Amino acid sequence: MFQNIGEILLLLWRTFCALPQSFRQRKMIFEQLFEIGNRSLLMACILSLFIGGVVALQSGPVLAERGIASALGGLVGISLAKELSPVMMAILIAGRIGSAMAAEIGSMRVYQEVDALRTMNINPIHYLVLPRITAICIAMPLLVIFSMLVGWMGGGFVAVANHRIALTFQTFFSNLHDVVQLKDVANGLIKSLAFAFVIGTVSCHQGLTTIGGPRGIGRSVTKAVVNSIVLILILDYYITRVMLAFDND
Amino acid sequence: MTDAAPHSIQVRISGLRKSYGEQLVLKGIDFSVERGEIFVVMGPSGSGKSVLLRHIIGLEEPDQGDILFDGRSILQSEVARQYRLAMVFQSGALLNYLTVGQNVGLYLQEHRLRKPEEIDRIVTEKLDLLGLKGVKDKLPGELSGGMNKRVAIARALVIDPQLVLYDEPTSELDPLMTITIGEEILNLKARIHVTSIVVTHDRELAFGVADRLAIMDDGQILFVGTPDEVRRSQHPFIRRFLNADFKAKAISDLS
Ligand SMILES: Nc1ncnc2c1ncn2[C@@H]1O[C@H](COP(=O)(O)OP(=O)(O)OP(=O)(O)O)[C@@H](O)[C@H]1O
Ligand SMILES: [Mg+2]
């Protein structure tokens, strides 16, 4: 997968260069945004609710034993905002949207539709890649905000309902409010934007380089998803390190 | 000639070679196509006809050799951009998520060449021309293979091309539609003097429209000539290829 990184970066660069064109493709961008919302909102909701819940469930009793259960709100708040929401949403979107992008562009490639575009002097990067990457970059941060809010709710429900934690909503959310700062949320959003670029570029690149008929499309889809997720997790580590360095200043 | 000039291209191919991996697909192709000529390429499946067309339209880069439009090499990318080229792909290659009308109008729409109402008018006109009334709002997936092919031809005509490449334009069409397409290829030449290169297996179409014919086999051009010259050719392969007939008797004898 790593020999492709140069090509992927090149595609990313070309897309950046094409950004001024994006207003011309606004219809396509809206279509893509609608697709993304449509395909992932429900899943995002369920996923976030349970992730928030399980974090509370795991750490709540441990804190409660030490008499600091009231710190649970902040813990759930921070872990979702800085880490879990961006990463989980990225994995979800890689699976649901990245795969679809690779499949769509891959089949266009295999059935010579991309070639047909070229013969009409329509640049596939402007026409196919740009709207998709733009849409995913708009959608991801929004989705992550949504995920944080839902995840916090999930954590709150568990904190109230679980008899070993037994907090009130009030204590949970006031602690969350005290601990989580705007910069933590921003932290998560910056991550999510980086992940969005990874998913968009890796999937579109994979689609555009599809060869070998229908089976090739299948291979491309798998590779797009797997490569995106691996890159996301690696990138997550390094972005976190960089951000921590800034925090310490 | 001067008033024809803006609407056609002279194409020259010299020493074109291309291999994919180990496989040498084009083994030195030389021919030229004059302005406004209909040049037909025939040859067995796998002989490299589609690959040849992909080179002419600029989708592939040759390993060796050159392709010249009006004497200028198109391997410099600016040259090819100055011409309006169109290709009808063997598979049609319509964009599946766009309607037929959007497909046909795509070129004008994306390059902002006409106002939307005008695009609509042109699209309807071209579709009517190819006998495709009332399909404008359908998706390509809802049409038959032959209809898809005709939509692809309509899409090519909308570009108002100076050179059209047809890759087996009639392979999925019934005999009547084949005649229509053949007539349209001839019409286009008469009306706007466009240069056409037609790849086909269809002997009727080939001899019906060709100004000159090339016979290709295994990455090489075996023969180039007028339809009469080709008919008279004594080359054994060409004789076999052109006279191939269903030997019903031989088969019934077997049983
Ligand atoms: N992108 C490619 N990579 C590898 N091999 C290729 C590629 N394109 C074509 N070939 C090979 O080149 C040869 C010629 O292919 P081409 O499609 O030009 O045949 P054709 O003459 O158009 O045949 P048909 O009449 O069946 O369409 C085939 O053997 C094919 O396998
Ligand atoms: Mg072919």
Image (cartoon, helix red, strand yellow):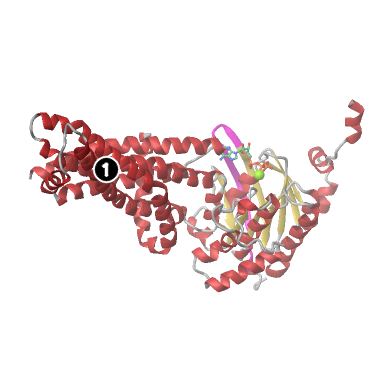
The quadrant of the rendered image in which ligand 1 is seen is top right
Residue B49, relative to residue B126: is it above or below?
A: above
Residue found 12% across the figure and 32% down from its top: A63
Residue occupying the point 73% across, 52% down: B170
Q: Position of residue B10 (x, y in %)?
A: 64, 60
> Considering the image in quadrants, where does the C terminus of chain B appear?
top right
Q: Nearer the viewer, residue B161 or B238?
A: B161
| Residue A237 makes an appearance in the image | yes
Q: Quadrant of residue B17?
A: top right
Total count of labels: 1
Question: Mark 1 is on which residue type?
Answer: Ser
**Residue at mark 1:** A85
Instruction: Please provide the residue range marked out in magenta.
Output: B6-24
Magenta span main SS: strand
Q: Is residue B12 in the magenta section?
A: yes
Expressed as whole percent of the image width and height from the top left, the position of residue A100 reads 45, 44
Query: Could you tell me which quadrant the N terminus of chain B lies in?
Result: bottom right
Q: Quadrant of residue B83?
A: bottom right
Q: Residues within 10 Å of mark 1 (few under 14, many from 20)?
A: many
